[in-house]
Image (cartoon, coloured by chain):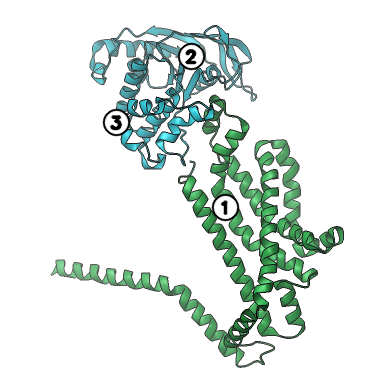
Amino acid sequence: MLNITDVTHVYPNGVEALQRLTLRVVRSEITAVVGRSGCGKSTLLRIAAGLQSPQRGSITLNDAPVHGPTSDVSLMFQDAALLPWCTVRANIALPLDLQHRRDTGEVDYMIDLVGLREFAHALPSQISGGMAQRVALARALVLNPRLLLLDEPFGALDAFTRESLTQSVFDICRDAGATVMLVTHSIAEAVFLADRVVVLTPRPGRVAAEIAVGLPLRRTWDLQRSPEFAAIVGEVRDAMK
Amino acid sequence: MYVSDKSDKIEAQKRAGATNALLLRAAPLIGLVAFFVVWHLLSLRYPPFILPGPLVVAETFITRTTDGTLPLHIAVTAGEALPGLLLGTAAALLLGYPAAHSRFADRLISPLVIASQGVPLIAVAPLIFIWFGNGYGAKLLVCALIVFFPIVVNVTSGLRSVPPHLHDVFRMLGASRLDTFTRLELPAALPFIFAGLRTAGALSMIGALTGEFLSSNRGLGFLINQATGLYDTALVLAAIVSTIATALAIHAGIRGLEHAVVRGTNRGALS
């Protein structure tokens, strides 16, 4: 699916964000990338999205080189990044509008999928932060992308909303069979959501470890109390040291 | 006893609050009445050609309005101010867009824009009349020049106010430059542009009057100039009142347009 091979990225100020990083995201899998602040997680995601070009290395999506943004890849940010003057519905329909594609029911499907039917005509200022993130998720999924990139999508939310939204995103992505690469600094979130956790070293980011999460495909937050979950969290923590 | 004291205190606070609110509402009216009273009292000490009283000015205003003098000159001045405002706005949009998107363009344009504000309009306007003649076009240019600065500053700030993540969203979706401008940047910049327009609306009247002071045979600037020469101070003041009323009307028009455009389509702010 997505192959990131031997990627090195140095910013103009001389900061080396990534160093010879190689990573593979497998179709229909959720891959979480964790690491300490400043280890180059977000840079990696922007490179995977085609928003930045690395100085060295190659990125391929289904064996085709990635040279820039493409509609095959969607990106969801830490803040919902919604258009405040557009309704929930219009925000979700934005990708279709910009690509001059007709809505053949995708928008309604997405509104139902993220459970915002009642708020379809509300403005972003009239909904909560958690709802706004769900709108952003629906917008990211409406074009049915091959790859969904999530950049700390729950970082700006309170603990309770974060927990319930993580569960929603997990269920939605599983139901949609989406291929997801998630960047987070929360180990518990990474283990809960992912099939595989990739641990990055402190700057410059390199792959320190890849840990397979052998938990059941259907998960709920109760799983966090299980010894298996704790063991994987411990393994990820050890890899980050 | 204690409870009763407390409720009395709350009642007293409520009464004081209501009185304060009433005073706050009446403040503009009180100020206006005080101004007219002081003006009237002062006018009793001077001859009408030095300081006519408010009643004399009101009488002149009504007479010159009914005989068509003031409406004619108001129409001429507004006919220069409004197109000048449009011209200045168009120029500000044309230059503000590259200035907001390119550091090179910003560095190229900004010093010239700032320099243009360092010279009083009254010093530049005669040059415009020398270069472009003393016709209608030159007056439009004077208006456009004065309104350009506040609008270009606001256009640039507004276009730059779009958070980088939203630009990334549009890039990821393969949006064209035109789509990015019309669907993201312009709606985001509209509140800024209208803030600039509100300031520029009043300035456009100053531009129009400056042009008429220098070279004109019609318009409020001309009327003020002519009436000053004739020591018709009541007419000067009536023309000034007309100028203020026209500026307020332009301001109200811009507010109305803003309400229709911004509140209608841009009901939230980018954060």
Residue B166, percent across and down? Answer: 52, 33
Which numbered tag is attached to residue A178? none
CB within 8 Å, label 1 to label 3: no
Q: Residues within 10 Å of mark 2 (few under 14, many from 20)?
A: many
- Chain letter, green: B
Among all residues in the image, which is located at the extreme left?
Answer: B1
Quadrant occupied by the C terminus of chain A: top left
The residue at which mark 3 appears reads as: A160
Residue at position x 54%, y 62% in the image? B252
Of the pair B30 and B76, the residue shown nearer to us: B76
- Chain letter, cyan: A
Residue B184, percent across and down? Answer: 55, 37
- What is the C-alpha distance between the residues marked 1 and 3? 40 Å
Label 3 element class: helix
- Which is more foreground, mark 1 or mark 2? 1
Whether discs 1 and 3 lie on one chain: the answer is no
Residue A221 visible in the displayed image: yes
In this rendering, position of residue B11 left or right of residue A81: left
